Amino acid sequence: MTKPTIRIAVAAAALATAGAAFANTPVEGDAIKQLVSGKRIYLAAPIGGEFPLFYRPDGQVDGSGEAIGLGRFLKPKDKGRWWVRGNNLCQKWETWYDGKTICFTLTDLGGSKVKWVQDNGDTGVARIGN
């Protein structure tokens, strides 16, 4: 390898290592709000596809299961409120979860993926869109 090629290879390895250092990092406090506010979060559905939730900057959250064809099985749309409590993303839907407050911890998996863990122990992966 020539010297410029070696430098590029070393720089690429350093960037890959730096990116890995940020992966699997808990998202906490105000960083949660920055992560989700104004974004569409796509939950990976166990039956395939993605379930979109839109976290509006004003604290409203909208959800729709129509994207993965849930309209024939359950109420596919709901809306509610979201907020950050400590190191948790919390939300309260009008009808989903019987209107009870649910909270999650989030872990940055790198790229646009996050792992979520609900306060009842359920867990999954989501993709952050715009």
Image (cartoon, rainbow, N blue to C red):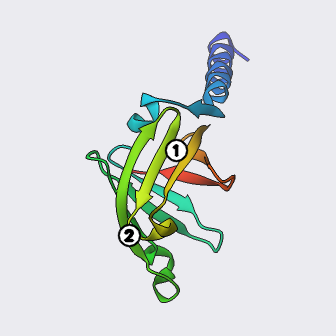
Q: Is residue 100 above or below residue 28?
A: below
Instruction: Where is residue 2? Give x, y as percent.
Output: 69, 14
Relative image position of residue 126 (x, y in whole percent): 56, 53
According to the picture, the residue beneath numbered tag 2 turns out to be 78
Task: Please tell me which residue is depicted at 50% across the width and 81% down the height of the picture.
Answer: 70
Q: Position of residue 103 (x, y in %)?
A: 53, 48
Disc 1, SS: loop
Q: In the rendered structure, which amino acid carries the disc numbered 2? A: Asp
Q: Residue at x 44, y 80 (%)?
A: 75
Query: x and y percent of residue 96 in the render?
Result: 47, 69
Q: Nearer the viewer, residue 4 or 24?
A: 24
Q: Is residue 130 visible?
A: no
Per the image, label 2 sits on a secondary structure element best described as: strand
Q: Residue at x 44, y 64 (%)?
A: 99
The residues bearing labels 1 and 2 have C-alpha atoms spaced at a distance of 24 Å
Counting residues from the start of the chain, the first of labels 1 and 2 encountered is 2
Give the labeled residue for mark 1.
112
Q: In the rendered structure, which amino acid carries the disc numbered 1?
A: Ser
Q: Quadrant of residue 66?
A: bottom left
Report whether 82 appears left or right of 4.
left
